[in-house]
Amino acid sequence: MKVIGIAGSLRPDSNTLRYLQTALEALAGQGLSTELISLRGKQINPCLGCYKCQEQPSCAQQEDDFAEILEKMKDAQGIILGSPVYLSSVVPQMMALLARATFVAHWNGKFLKDKVGGPITVARRAGHNLAFSQLLLWFFINGITVPGSSYWTVGTAGAGGARDADRDQEGMLHVTNFAHNMAGVMKKLFA
């Protein structure tokens, strides 16, 4: 069983990356195969609304990094999405990826359905709930099962620009609990 974690942060060594790594390490500890995909350095164009994905099993736009990531999303049984919170929202690169993935999947057998996944958001102070909800709704619209945790899987960093969200011990605990629950659900569904 394979789980991919997609990090929406464009910063190196970001808080979001650390939270995703924590989740993936917990999943690997449960015997699952994991892969971290960072959107940093990748070009993900927004959906053009051309509906060419109704006629072919891929996105018509081929000049960016979307197709490679979509293939990994197709192949994985589990998907974790991590995004920093900017203005109480998910970062634009992540939203572009998710919009395009949803359209291609929807028109091609709903291939994201019946996977397991969940969101992680990290912010300096606030805005987690709106960004968390955006990601959660993406999982729901694609028929992806989302296991619970001991609280929302959100992290809080210190002063602006600080890379210290891993000091949020409670946030890290909730991410680890989520990962353990995700592994349990996946083993029941896919074993």
Image: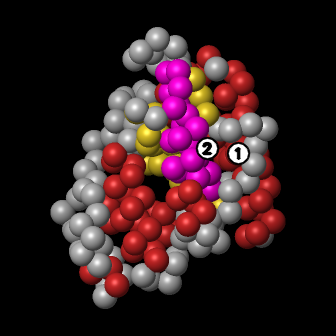
Is residue 152 shown above or below 102?
above
Q: Secondary structure at mark 2?
A: helix
**Tag 2 or tag 1, which sits nearer the N-term?**
2
Across and down, in percent, residue 55 comes to: 31, 88
x then y, percent, for residue 160: 42, 15
Q: Horizontally, is 49 left or right of 146 in the view? A: left
* In this rendering, the label closer to the viewer, 1 or 2: 1
- Answer few, some or many: residues within 10 Å of disc 1's Cα (few below 14, many 20 plus, some between 14 and 19): many
Residue for badge 2: 24
Q: Is residue 3 visible?
A: no
* Residue under pointer 1: 179
Q: Quadrant of residue 113?
A: bottom right
Amino acid identity at mark 2: Leu
Query: Which residue is drawn at the image coordinates 46% and 77% (left, top)?
Result: 106
- Is residue 12 shown above or below 25? above
For mark 1, give the secondary structure. helix
Instruction: Read off the magenta span.
Output: 117-136
Image disc number at residue 39:
none
Q: Nearer the viewer, residue 66 or 123?
A: 123
Count of marks, rendered view: 2
Residue drawn at x 29%, y 63% is 47
Does the segment drawn in magenta span residue 53?
A: no
Along the line of sight, the residue nearer the viewer: 187 or 58: 58
The residue at the point 40 percent across, 17 percent down is 161
Residue 5 at what x, y percent from top left? Answer: 53, 49
